Amino acid sequence: MAQPHVQSGQVTSVRPLGAAIAGARTTALLKARQLEVVRLVLHAGQALREHAAPGEVTVHCLEGRVDFSLPGVTHRLEAGDWIHLAARAPHALRALDDASLLVTICLQPGPAD
């Protein structure tokens, strides 16, 4: 059964999962007309191949470590690190440890570059 999205005005936790991360899965917290917010869970060795979003994206590493690849550069994200991407920026991720990340996606296309 799908988990319901967070409702307007509802408080929810995005604290690190700690030991519970071993059995955790990615969860969509919110999907609205303009915005999507996801707790992305990647277990050690898992990867997301290169992709892009129509609008801007932010990624906040809550726990663990991931390699976050952009064309020509790979950044190591650890707990507390945050990155912003322009609209349509290609990127890929690979988990070095079990990791959870708070991903915010603007669903509206950004202005043409």
Image (cartoon, helix red, strand yellow):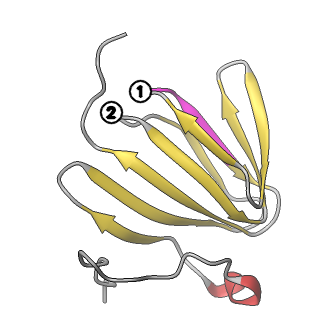
Question: How far across and how far down the image is residue 33, in percent?
Answer: 17, 53
First in sequence: mark 2 vs mark 1: 2
Q: Is residue 13 magenta?
A: no
Residue type at numbered disc 2: Pro
Horizontally, residue 81 falls left or right of residue 52, namely right
Tag 1, which secondary structure?
loop
Q: Residue at x 65, y 21 (%)?
A: 71
Circle number at residue 20: none
Q: Which mark is residue 54?
A: 2
**Identity of the residue furthest to the top in this view:** 113
- Taking the spot 39% from the left edge, 69% from the top edge, the residue there is 28
Per the image, label 2 sits on a secondary structure element best described as loop
CA distance separating discs 2 and 1: 5 Å
Q: Nearer the viewer, residue 85 or 2?
A: 85
Q: Position of residue 38 (x, y in %)?
A: 45, 63
Please state if 65 lies on the left or on the right of 92 as rendered. Answer: right
In the shown orientation, is residue 57 left or right of residue 106?
Answer: right
Residue at position x 75%, y 84% from top? 18
Looking at numbered disc 1 in the image, what kind of residue is underneath it?
Arg
Look at the image and tell me in which quarter the N terminus lies. bottom left
Name the quadrant containing residue 67. top right
Image: 6 above or below 107: below
Q: Which image quadrant: the C terminus?
A: top left
Residue at far front of view: 9
**Residue 81 point in image, percent of width and height:** 73, 51
Q: Residues within 10 Å of mark 2 (few under 14, many from 20)?
A: some
Percent from the top left, x then y, of residue 74?
76, 32
Q: Are marks 2 and 1 in contact (CB under 8 Å)?
A: yes
Residue tagged 1: 88
Q: Crowding near pointer 1: few (<14 within 10 Å), some, many (20+)?
A: some
| First to last magenta residue range | 88-93
